[in-house]
């Protein structure tokens, strides 16, 4: 299976001191998960292009931009210019993502697909070979701090089996309600990228929380 990656969600950070929060955890994590919300696909509005460009000089962490937007492909050139490394877009918003994947590659962006808790893995299957990462939401998208939905683990298992059987290199990512316990469940099901917001940035000591999460997943 692909290497374990921990991706703290910036949505759970203290917005008044983003630089301090990012620098504090960067030695203990692999990616920085950045939720881009437009107020249409999901009710909330979060980070946009200027924020991503503003924090890019702070760190060399991989910027994993999760596009919770109705027209995710429209943002790709600007995201690339702002410093994004990869994008994931919802199959519910982009049910035919072939052209979007091509546009992402043209802009030197990694490409991934996301599905909501109620969306079956079957919706992603025809496009799996396009994806560097497949993200399963284990909460409803658009809000942080929700409880983990264990029924999503069956989709993670299905995706891992699909990827391994076909020799694909896609990472399997899970986002929502990730704690020490649910992270273990997710990794056991086949996930290798864990998006943890409150568990890391909501902790009294975020870097220690990130290190503890990694140790727990490595069985230490």
Image (tube, rainbow, N blue to C red):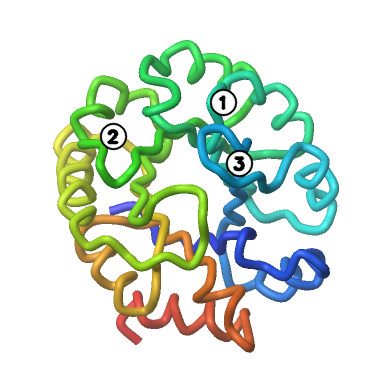
Which residue corresponds to the image point at 62% horizontal and 59% vertical from the top-left? 11
Q: CA distance from mark 1 to mark 2?
A: 24 Å
Which residue corresponds to the image point at 64% horizontal and 60% vertical from the top-left? 10
Query: Which circle's residue, 1 or 2, is located before the other in the chain?
Result: 1
Front residue (pair 146, 195): 146
Residue neighbourhood size for the residue with mark 3, other residues' Cα within 10 Å, grouped as few (<14), some (14–19), many (≥20): many
Left or right of residue 34, residue 17 in this image: right
Left or right of residue 66, residue 126 in this image: left
The correct choice, above or below, for 133 with respect to 73 in the image is below
State which mark lies toward you, 1 or 2.
1
x, y percentage for residue 14? 72, 70
Left or right of residue 14, residue 2 in this image: left
Q: Quadrant of residue 125?
A: top left
x, y percentage for residue 143? 51, 56
Q: CA distance from mark 1 to mark 3?
A: 10 Å
For label 2, the residue is 168
Looking at the rendered structure, which numbered label has been put on residue 72? Answer: 1
x, y percentage for residue 23? 76, 70
State which mark lies toward you, 1 or 3.
3
For label 3, the residue is 37
């Amino acid at each position: 299976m692909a290497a374990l990656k921990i991706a703290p969600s910036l949505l759970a950070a203290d917005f008044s001191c983003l630089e301090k929060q990012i620098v504090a955890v960067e030695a203990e994590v692999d990616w920085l998960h950045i939720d881009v919300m437009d107020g249409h696909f999901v009710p909330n509005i979060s980070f946009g292009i200027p924020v991503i460009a503003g924090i890019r000089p702070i760190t060399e962490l991989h910027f994993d931009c999760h596009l919770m937007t109705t027209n995710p492909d429209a943002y790709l050139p600007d995201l690339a210019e702002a410093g994004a490394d990869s994008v994931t877009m919802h199959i519910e918003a982009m049910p035919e993502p072939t052209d979007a994947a091509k546009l992402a590659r043209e802009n030197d962006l990694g490409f991934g697909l996301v599905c909501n808790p109620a969306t079956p893995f079957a919706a992603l299957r025809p496009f799996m070979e396009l994806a560097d990462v497949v993200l399963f939401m284990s909460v409803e998208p658009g809000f942080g701090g929700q409880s983990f939905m264990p029924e999503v683990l069956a989709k993670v298992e299905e995706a891992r089996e699909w990827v391994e059987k076909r020799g694909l290199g896609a990472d399997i990512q899970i986002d929502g309600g990730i704690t020490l316990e649910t992270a273990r469940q997710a990794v056991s099901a086949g996930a290798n990228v864990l998006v943890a917001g409150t568990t890391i940035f909501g902790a009294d000591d975020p870097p220690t929380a990130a290190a503890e999460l990694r140790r727990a997943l490595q069985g230490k």
